[in-house]
């Protein structure tokens, strides 16, 4: 199955079987169900998540860009799955030996505000 540049969230999660939470913790997915406009995701740590199927959502962006803060200890995601998730599209197509790593985010980016000078 060839994925486009911005696939629907359902096809992305059902293929990768990983789910980044709002805090950036990567969970393993047991089951993904399509409920029309919504999808229900069940993780290995017994969380059931109901979200809108979208292309531009935070989850879809995090999965496409491979952004992760930490990995869930309760889900016990195997090492081979993390390595497969960290591989880039180029490496899967050709025999390139360069790896695109998972991007672990350590701090949140905040907007810089200019301090106002009092007169």
Image (tube, grey):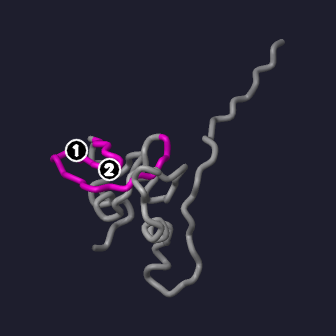
48 left or right, relative to 72: left
Question: Where in the figure is residue 62, as x and y percent of width and height?
Answer: 46, 52
Q: Which residues are magenta?
A: 23-49
Which residue lies at the image location 58% right of the left edge and 54% below the top edge? 104
Quarter where residue 5 is shown: bottom left
Q: Which residue is mark 1?
A: 38
Q: Please check the rendered image and state whether residue 42 is part of the magenta-colored stretch, yes or no.
A: yes
Which residue lies at the image location 32% right of the left edge and 57% below the top edge? 13
Question: Where in the figure is residue 37, as x and y percent of width and height?
Answer: 20, 45
Q: Residue furthest bottom?
A: 95
Q: Earlier in the sequence, mark 1 or mark 2?
A: 1
Compute the Cα span from label 1 to label 2.
Answer: 16 Å
35 left or right, relative to 51: left
Which residue lies at the image location 35% right of the left edge and 63% below the top edge? 16
- Res 43 label: 2
Question: On the rendered image, what quadrant is the N terminus found in?
Answer: bottom left
User: What kind of element bears circle 2?
Assistant: strand
């Amino acid at each position: 199955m060839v994925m486009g540049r911005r696939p629907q969230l359902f096809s992305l999660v059902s293929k990768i079987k990983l789910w980044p939470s709002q805090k950036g913790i990567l969970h393993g997915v047991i089951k993904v169900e399509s409920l029309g406009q919504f999808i229900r995701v069940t993780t290995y740590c017994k969380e059931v998540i109901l979200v809108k199927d979208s292309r531009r959502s935070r989850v879809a962006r995090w999965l496409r860009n491979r952004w992760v803060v930490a990995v869930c200890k309760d889900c016990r995601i195997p090492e081979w799955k993390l390595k497969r998730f960290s591989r880039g599209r180029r490496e899967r197509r050709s025999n390139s030996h360069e790896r695109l790593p998972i991007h672990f985010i350590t701090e949140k980016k905040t907007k810089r505000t200019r301090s106002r000078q009092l007169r």
